[in-house]
């Protein structure tokens, strides 16, 4: 009879493998037992290692054996596939099911619903995300203006068409769902991905050369249309007015660009002193388009900037109901302005000449008329 010469290390190694394998199978069997346990919502922050996750699951009584859980992750190669977020788990789930839930392949995960309206700029979007506890506002702003483009340009080559690191205007307005603990990179990636589907696709369909504008200039003009228009029906007309002024080298004189320069984004009334600001975004003093978009335009504004309506107008003034009165000549524009101011007077009931502030009001009106006529 022939005997194999097995050394002690080989015997102990085999025994250890059998012990670990048997224990792991037993743990999986125990975790799959259909005892009645309450569901637990477990929060997994971004950047956690498998060791942190196993300890958290053990602390919340979702798994019995954290070491064996980590061994399962190691054996199956699942260590780096677990996601951050808020997950609904149960102690009765098998290890395999828990891992699949943490990978996002099944089960329930709590998501944060974030709606980005058309016309918000980076700072406003960052504030909204901070309110939802998705990001820290200042960190997000710095990331979008400086760091995001080089990171995302590999996946989204169209970003090479943006001549600045600032991605203002490219965070597409829509409704998004983010996992708790999601990174700012993933958030911006979602915004840019939607922009790629909607806006970049629209640009490519147009042939890429709309009315002598570059891709970046098109997005910039669309952002101005978005901020000027109260309803989408007037967007192509406003676009036509801007194109007429661009073709004739006339300053665009757009109030939203001035409020952007002032960082007083929702200021309702631009004053004469506001026009003195020395900024490339002040389209009363600077001809042409500002250097970047001033907000994130929606699809309607992007289409309007791509396909303006052919109109004879060079001026428009905002009415009390949010619509606009459009004019061909400067004289018509002045009459339209006066009509709007008269409506405001009647609405505010300040026509009494005995009012001590009446003279001050007349002076203010004169200033505002001058501003709107530039």
Image (cartoon, rainbow, N blue to C red):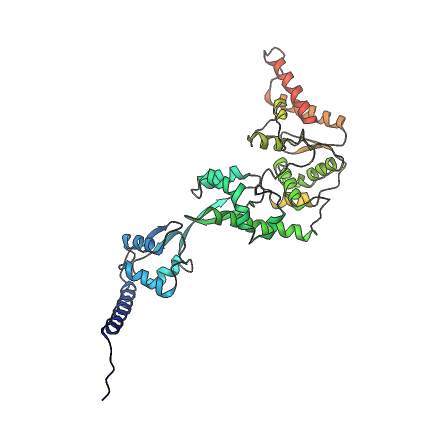
**Which residue is most to the bottom?**
1
| Residue 194: image location, x then y, percent | 56, 50
Residue 278 image-quadrant placement: top right
Examine the rendered structure and indicate whether residue 52 appears above or below residue 229.
below
* Residue 162 image offset from top left, x and y in percent: 61, 45
Residue 94 visible in the picture: no
| Viewer-closest of 177 and 288 | 288
Taking the image as drawn, is residue 283 in sight?
A: yes
Residue 179 drawn at (x, y percent): 43, 50
What is the quadrant of the N terminus in the image?
bottom left
Quadrant of the rendering where the C terminus is positioned: top right
Identify which residue is drawn at 69% across, 41% down: 236
Residue at screen point 24% across, 87% down = 2
Residue nearest the viewer, comparing 54 with 14: 14
Image x and y of residue 304, in percent: 67, 43
For the image shown, how many numbered marks are present on the structure? 0
Comparing 291 with 351, the one in front is 291
101 relative position to 120: left or right: left
Instruction: Answer left or right for 156 relative to 81.
Output: right
Residue 64 horizontal side relative to residue 194, left or right: left
Q: In the drawing, does residue 262 fall left or right of residue 338? A: left
């Amino acid at each position: 009879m022939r005997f194999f010469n097995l050394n002690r290390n080989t015997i102990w190694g085999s025994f250890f493998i059998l012990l670990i394998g048997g224990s792991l199978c037993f743990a999986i069997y125990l975790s799959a037992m259909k005892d009645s346990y309450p569901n637990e919502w477990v929060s997994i922050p971004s950047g956690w290692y498998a060791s942190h996750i196993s300890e958290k699951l053990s602390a919340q009584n979702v798994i019995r054996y954290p070491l064996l859980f980590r061994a399962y992750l190691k054996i199956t190669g699942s260590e780096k596939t677990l996601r951050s977020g808020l997950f609904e788990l149960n102690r009765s789930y098998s290890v395999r099911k828990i891992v699949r839930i943490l990978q996002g392949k099944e089960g329930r995960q709590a998501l944060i619903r974030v709606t980005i309206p058309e016309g918000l700029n980076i700072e406003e979007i960052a504030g909204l995300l901070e309110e939802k506890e998705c990001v820290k506002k200042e960190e997000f702003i710095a990331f979008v203006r400086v760091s995001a483009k080089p990171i995302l340009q590999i996946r989204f080559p169209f970003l090479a068409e943006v001549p600045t690191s600032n991605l203002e205007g490219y965070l597409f307005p829509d409704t998004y769902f983010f996992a708790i603990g999601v990174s700012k990179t993933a958030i911006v990636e979602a915004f840019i991905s939607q922009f790629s589907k909607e806006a970049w696709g629209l640009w490519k369909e147009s042939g890429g050369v709309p009315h002598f504008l570059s891709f970046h200039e098109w997005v910039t003009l669309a952002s101005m249309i978005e901020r000027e228009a109260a309803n989408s029906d007037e967007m192509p007309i406003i676009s036509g007015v801007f194109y007429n002024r661009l073709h004739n080298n006339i300053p665009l004189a757009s109030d939203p660009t001035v409020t952007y320069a002032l960082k007083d984004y929702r200021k309702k009334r631009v004053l004469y002193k506001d026009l003195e600001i020395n900024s490339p975004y002040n389209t009363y003093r600077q001809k042409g388009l500002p250097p970047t978009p001033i907000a994130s335009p929606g699809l309607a504004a992007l289409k309007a900037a791509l396909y303006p309506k052919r109109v004879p107008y060079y001026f428009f003034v905002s009415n009390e109901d949010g619509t606009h009165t459009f004019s061909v000549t400067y004289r018509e524009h002045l009459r339209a302005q006066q009509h709007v101011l008269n409506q405001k007077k009647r609405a505010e009931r300040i026509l009494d000449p005995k009012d001590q502030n009446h003279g001050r009001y007349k002076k203010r009106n004169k200033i505002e008329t001058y501003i709107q006529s530039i």
